[in-house]
Amino acid sequence: MIITQTPFRMSFFGGGTDFPGFYKEHGGAVISTTFDKYCYVNVRHLPRFFDYTTELSYAKIERVSRVEDIEHPAIREAMKQLDMHEIRLTYEADLPARSGLGTSSSFAVGMLNAFYALKGKYADKRKLADDAIFLERVLCNESGGVQDQIAASFGGLNRINFDADGYSVNPIIIAPDRKNLLNRNLMLFFTGFSRFSSDIQVEAEKNLKSKKDQLLEMLSLVDDAEKVLTSKCDLNEFGQLLDYTWKLKRGITNKVSTDSIDAVYEKAIKAGATGGKLLGAGGGGFLLFYVEPEKQKQVQEALDKFLYVPFEFETGGTRVIHYTPESYEPR
């Protein structure tokens, strides 16, 4: 039996510049972090007592005798890619799917990590990220960027750069007390609105050329934000930059935000938040705000209809937290 633990991520700056159609021509970069909310993938070989050979438990339960009959596209394609058979897989998570935290990519990374471990093979973080990108973007043909898979695999607070040759992961070197202050000044709220990010990503991908100027400006903000984090600048500038990048992002496609989300955002700003953004592709999910400590009570009261989710940054990325090898002979 194998159990993997894979963190979710929050992306601060540069989202949209991680689309291959953009960064291969213009370059790209994002600043993101993983935090202490995880998905867990439990995988073992299914005992041969049943009239089916594969059992999957996620938002639904699937029991099939042929891999080709699996409805979940990522599980089906991953099992075909790695030649997995007679599997029992269970998925659990600390936070809901389709909420802007890269949950589907965290699942893909954690599942691949578990599959490799079950086969007795070691896969390093780059291989897991690369395989998850290939799984989601090529095998499953889902629209979107490639930052989520990398963040979930590597973990930590990073600047991820993209160019025609691929990507590099660069940890942001920041004093521990300053990093803790950043963590304390961030507040996460669940709006309750879920959506499929791929629907929004399709629209965003269509707009890469027409919205080039906005994306280039969003890319320049990555440099500005990194400078704020790594220098002695007032950390509140980070919140101001979040507000600015959110306004730019809303211009990429009208599906990024809604009137309801805009109203919640404005309510938080009026209550004292310096800035913030909707996490992920848009359309719903989690709102992140930068709020100075003395104003956090007012913001929480203003958004009392929404679930407040405290969190801590994490640095480990995906990991195997339980490993019991199995002897397995194919039928």
Image (cartoon, helix red, strand yellow):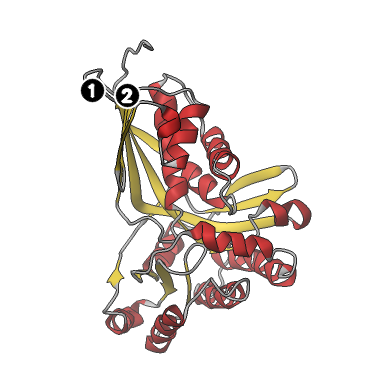
The residue lying toward the viewer, choosing from 13 and 197, is 197
Q: Are marks 2 and 1 in contact (CB under 8 Å)?
A: yes
State which quarter of the image contains the C terminus: top left
Q: Position of residue 290 (x, y in %)?
A: 44, 74
Q: Which residue is mark 1?
A: 50
Is residue 12 toward the left or the right of residue 104 in the image? Answer: right
User: Few, some or many C-alpha atoms within 10 Å of disc 2 (few <14, some 14-19, many ≥20)?
Assistant: some
Judge by depth and name the residue closer to the eye, 77 or 166. 77
> What's the residue type where badge 1 is placed?
Phe
Where does label 2 land, which residue?
53
68 vs 24, left or right, is: left
Element on which disc 2 rests: loop
Could you say which quadrant of the image residue 252 lies in?
A: bottom right
Local crowd size for mark 1, using a 10 Å CA cut-off: few (<14), some (14–19), many (≥20): few
Along the viewing direction, whichever of 272 and 24 lies nearer the viewer: 24
In the rendered structure, which amino acid carries the disc numbered 2? Thr
Task: Describe residue 259's horizontal placement relative to residue 1 as left or right.
Answer: right
Decide: is 157 above or below 135: below
